[in-house]
Image (tube, helix red, strand yellow):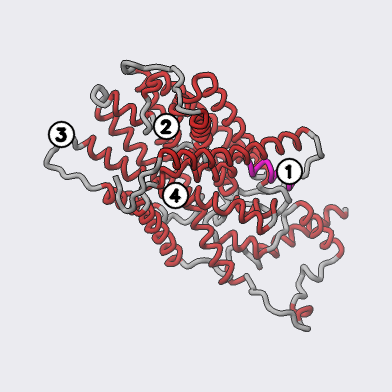
Amino acid sequence: MESELVVEEMKNISTTISSTSSPHDSNNIIPKTPKSPFSSKILMSPLASASPIMKKALTYMEEIGHLTKLHDHAQDAWLPITESRSGNAYYAAFHTLCSGIGVQALLLPLAFITLGWIWGIISLSLVFMWQLYTLWLLIQLHEFTPGIRNSRYLGLSMAAFGEKLGKILALFPTMYLSGGTCVTLIMIGGSTMKIFFQTVCASKSHITTLSTIEWYIVFTVSAIVLAQLPNLNSIAGISLVGSISAVTYCTLTWVISVVKERPEGVSFEHVENTSDVATICAILNALGMIVFAFRGHNLVLEIQGTMPSSLKNPSHVPMWKGVKFSYSIIALCLFPLAIGGYWAYGNLMPNGGILSALDKYHGEDTSKVILGTTSLLVAIHCLTSFQIYAMPVFDNWECKYTSKKKKPCPWWLRTGLRVFFGCLTFFISVALPFLPSLAGLIGGIALTVTLAYPCLMWIMIKKPNRYSPSWFVNWSLGLFGLVLSVLLVSGAIWTIATQGMDVHFFKTQ
């Protein structure tokens, strides 16, 4: 009988909360004020003067995690990542697939030149399983305390390592993986648009093509227009288009390379370096290419944050389903791309990767329609990826405003922030055209977000028994990830110091 009364009281409380304190209504958020002697009278409400049965109901709701601070819910309802929590496994699969495959995957055959067949396949397989495991850790840590959702990578880092250390460790890598990736996408997307135009209009000499910077502007304007969609859930359709584009151009490149006749002089012999240090750096660079081919870990918590969650239906269940599906597709793209590309071109693979090899060795005997379609798909994928990688930056900026003003951003401010971000990334892409040359250096720093931090955060939060399998595995992977990051950064610095780097400001090529 008492349990029935508790359930009934819980329903009444839920009705009261939903009708009087909707998190989507900014008028219900009361700014903090100094305490007064009259506060006890003001705070007398049905919840404060609850009967014993109601108090039991409140206690139960707190234990299962369905009674949290209304202010936290309100701010989440104002921010782009968590504004809509109607996501599902399909949306998760679209976002994960779109953000998980990138143009950097086209460089995988280059890694095999240094590592060879056996170590190349072993390294690719081990890194794939490692990053899939860290993805699972992040998904489980999203809601490690019932009722408290960590919908941002930086927030989870601060919860695990403390506010100051968490910011130091995660702020730069996550912001680089968002803003820096958007800058790179402008460079690649704009350049690919130019190649597409030249391929399609090659026979029309009277048509004058735009300059590289002008194509950057075309790409940036298109990205800014799409960026006006309000939240992460609203770009699910865009992520679906990006996913289809990425899978298609990855498949086209390796299938055409394998089907076409291999160029003369293809060899799989190990390339000798001038010194042992050069050999070590080449190996580290190859491992860096493999690791950097898997991206998107800085977005998995954000994607999961778009899903509803309850005690009976936790968000980690549909999220993991979406991730398993998307990474099955990613594996079917990356492994044939790496293996087929290396088989087709061997040591003749140019530094631009398999797409450059396709244009170099089969540009004359391949249909212009196929080459143009491939370039167009790359540009579309860059445009769609820009949206999901920019969303954490939009969220961070709006979070600062809502925290200070205690109200959501007006539409004109949200629009202005997104236009400003597009202009800022465009300016950086023009001012620092050599930025991709630093990808190995900065990528080594950002590697910790993918392979190291999730393992260490699991230990700090879950606190597994010392010397247990979970304790041993996560400490080993976490520390090895940190060491690998230091080695990659050192190798990148040594390579820049010995081979030099063509630094040119405001001179796009």
Q: Name the residue under label 1.
A: 459
Return the disc, 2 or 4, that comes first in the chain's sequence.
Answer: 2
Q: Is residue 473 magenta?
A: no
Tag nearer the camera, 1 or 3: 1
In the rendered structure, the answer to whether residue 494 lies left or right of residue 11 reads left
**Which residue lies most toward the bottom here?**
37
Q: Mark 2 points at which residue?
A: 106
Residue 354's mark? none
Tag nearer the camera, 1 or 4: 1
Q: Name the residue under label 3.
A: 203
Q: Can residue 290 be seen in this view?
A: no
Task: Say few, some or many: other residues with alpha carbon within 10 Å of mark 1 (under 14 / 14 to 19 / 20 or more).
Answer: many
Q: Mark 4 points at which residue?
A: 387
Return the disc, 1 or 3, that comes first in the chain's sequence.
Answer: 3
Return the disc, 1 or 2, that comes first in the chain's sequence.
Answer: 2
Decide: is 369 above or below 396.
above
Report the Cα–Cα distance between label 1 and label 4.
Answer: 33 Å
Helix, strand or loop at label 4? It is helix
Disc 3 marks which amino acid?
A: Ser
Q: Quadrant of residue 396?
A: bottom right
Q: Is residue 459 magenta?
A: yes
Disc 2 marks which amino acid?
A: Leu
